[in-house]
Image (cartoon, coloured by chain):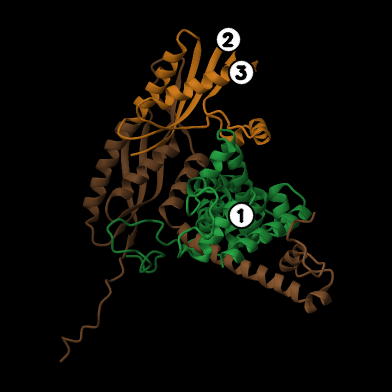
């Protein structure tokens, strides 16, 4: 199908040049080599392609890094959707109703409480025991990474407290124990130092 | 035998969606039937471009079965919000016999 | 204190909150290996792939759907589909273009669903056009608009089918066959639409100069 402006004066078409740009193949390579119109058309298409690349670079830069919040939100949502875990029953008012919360939603909440403590990041999080059975005794295991320098015992105790409060409000589980294990101690890089020449004799 | 109640239920599902969204503490309503768990649903949606219904309605032996999957936002407790969502659905249905299932899939601190 | 640890000495900022996503050990592993592990069920490997290709997926979805909000929805849906279909990926090394093809399909589906609720005119007006005008005249946009901005404007003027082919080619370097599969048209149609898109864009850009 010919488009207005597709035809070049030499009788060949932009469409051929466009396909040549993408595939390196053209019906009459000898003509292409010698035809000023075709060469000009190709140059124009190449300029456009370069500009397209600039746009791509700008767009990708604008899209940010895969470590940014927007991606973290997407991954969090993915986890909730793809790994809901077991269903934790909730008391219903009407005996005909069944109400639940997913294990995934509770784990995510535990992680976000741990993450909200300064210098702390949650790792693995487990609810041990039969959470699908109302009233069953449950143990919570949480692994955390802590930045070196924070009083760890104090941090773990504070976190345990916060988690206990949160679980009391957001679940109807009978929490018997909350175990916090520090699995990683992180070192912050030393602040950038300018060479301290004043002290030298 | 489970039947899908057709045109009538499309409006009811929309109404119930509004009802659930209006419950204090409900931050989101997710498709009750996640896409991949409902192969037939996915196929239909792909052809017609329709949004999958968020509130799931089926009828079994004269009783309506309603399923909703929600997100809960702070500061209200998830168990309370789930109960309130179920209650709101029942209030909207009036005397129609129904079985309600609410699943909390996300809790925001 | 452990001797060697992936996070120690790495790109951890001095701010009090430590983000576990600051630097991950899997970030250095090549695509093919990550895809293999992810297909086995390794969610950490899958997330590493998501973080690595996320920005390009987001940029592509943004040009295909018109808005960043839609783009993020599309990226999420694409990753969900990818996770479910990983075992269908025959060439793990090609996971990047596979992800981008899914983004292409999901972007179009997304637009189709939105269209059921919006008139077509309204939809066009939701696009993030740089000047906000319905038919931006490249000469009347801000005097110092860069050539890239002019290209963005020119892109929004293209018929949708041409724009899609152009984005999938220029952004994702998909072959005619891959674009054809994504858009459910023939490779010959791809060739034609691509040519028409380039003619229109080149003409607009030349006039702008």
Give the chain coloured orange. B
Quarter-of-image position of residue B21: top left
Which image quarter is the N terminus of chain B in?
A: top right
Q: Is residue C23 visible?
A: yes
* N-term mark: 2 or 3: 3
Q: Which mark is residue B7?
A: 3
What colour is chain A?
A: brown
Q: Chain of mark 1?
A: C
Circle 2 sits on which residue? Answer: B62
Residue visible at 42% across and 20% down?
Answer: B86
**x and y percentages locating residue C5 in the rendered image:** 39, 65
Depicted C177 relative to depicted A160: above or below? below
Residue located beneath label 1 in the image: C100
| Same chain assignment for discs 1 and 3 | no
Q: Is residue A95 visible?
A: no
Q: Secondary structure at mark 2?
A: loop
Q: Where residue C19 sits in the image (x, y, percent)?
A: 36, 56
Observer-nearest of C21 and A154: C21
Marks 1/3: CA–CA distance: 37 Å
Residue A71 horizontal/vertical position (percent):
46, 52
Q: Find residue C143 and report its horizontal and vertical position in percent.
A: 46, 63
Please name the color used to draw chain C.
Answer: green
Q: Is residue C189 left or right of residue A64?
A: right
Secondary structure category for the residue under label 1: helix
The C terminus of chain B sits in image quarter: top left
Please state which of the two labelled residues, at mark 2 or mark 1, is closer to the viewer. 1
């Amino acid at each position: 199908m010919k488009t207005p402006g597709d035809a070049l004066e030499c009788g060949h078409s932009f469409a051929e040049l466009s396909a040549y740009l993408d595939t390196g193949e053209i019906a009459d390579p000898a003509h292409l080599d010698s035809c000023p119109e075709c060469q000009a058309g190709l140059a124009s298409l190449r300029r456009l392609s370069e500009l397209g690349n600039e746009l791509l670079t700008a767009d990708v830069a604008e899209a940010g890094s895969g470590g940014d919040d927007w991606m973290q939100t997407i991954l969090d949502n993915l986890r909730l959707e793809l790994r809901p875990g077991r269903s934790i029953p909730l008391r219903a008012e009407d005996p005909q109703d069944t109400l639940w919360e997913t294990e995934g939603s509770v784990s995510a909440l535990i992680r976000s409480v741990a993450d909200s403590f300064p210098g702390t990041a949650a790792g693995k999080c487990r609810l041990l025991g039969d959470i699908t059975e109302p009233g069953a005794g449950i143990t919570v295991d949480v692994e955390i990474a802590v930045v070196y320098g924070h009083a760890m015992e104090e941090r773990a105790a504070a976190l345990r407290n916060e988690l206990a409060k949160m679980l009391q409000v957001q679940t109807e589980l009978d929490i018997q124990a909350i175990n916090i294990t520090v699995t990683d101690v992180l070192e912050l890089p030393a602040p950038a130092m300018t060479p301290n020449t004043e002290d030298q004799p | 035998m489970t039947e899908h109640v057709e045109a009538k239920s499309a409006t009811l599902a929309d109404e119930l969606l509004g009802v659930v969204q209006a419950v204090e503490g409900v931050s989101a309503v997710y498709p009750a039937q996640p896409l991949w768990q409902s192969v037939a649903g996915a196929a239909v949606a792909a052809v017609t471009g329709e949004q999958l219904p968020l509130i799931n309605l089926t009828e079994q032996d004269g009783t309506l079965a309603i399923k909703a999957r929600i997100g809960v936002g702070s500061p209200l407790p998830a168990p309370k919000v789930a109960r309130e969502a179920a209650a709101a659905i029942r209030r909207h249905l009036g005397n129609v016999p129904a079985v309600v299932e609410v699943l909390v899939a996300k809790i925001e601190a | 204190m452990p001797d060697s640890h992936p996070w120690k000495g790495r790109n951890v900022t001095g701010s009090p909150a430590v983000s576990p996503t600051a630097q991950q050990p899997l970030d250095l592993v090549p695509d093919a290996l990550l895809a293999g592990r992810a297909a086995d069920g390794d969610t950490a490997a899958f997330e590493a792939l998501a973080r690595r290709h996320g920005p390009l997926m987001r940029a592509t979805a943004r040009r295909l759907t018109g808005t960043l909000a839609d783009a993020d929805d599309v990226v999420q849906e694409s990753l969900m589909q990818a996770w479910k279909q990983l075992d269908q990926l025959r060439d793990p090394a090609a996971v990047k273009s596979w992800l981008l093809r899914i983004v292409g399909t999901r972007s179009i589906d997304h637009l189709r669903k939105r269209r059921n609720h919006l008139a077509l005119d309204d939809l066009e007006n939701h696009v993030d056009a740089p000047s906000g005008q319905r038919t931006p005249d490249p000469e009347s946009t801000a005097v110092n608009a860069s050539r890239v901005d002019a290209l963005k404007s020119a892109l929004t003027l293209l018929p949708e089918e041409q724009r899609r082919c152009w984005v999938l080619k220029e952004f994702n370097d998909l072959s005619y066959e891959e674009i054809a599969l994504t858009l459910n048209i023939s490779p010959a149609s791809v060739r034609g639409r691509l040519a028409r898109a380039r003619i229109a864009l080149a003409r607009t850009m030349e006039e702008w100069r």
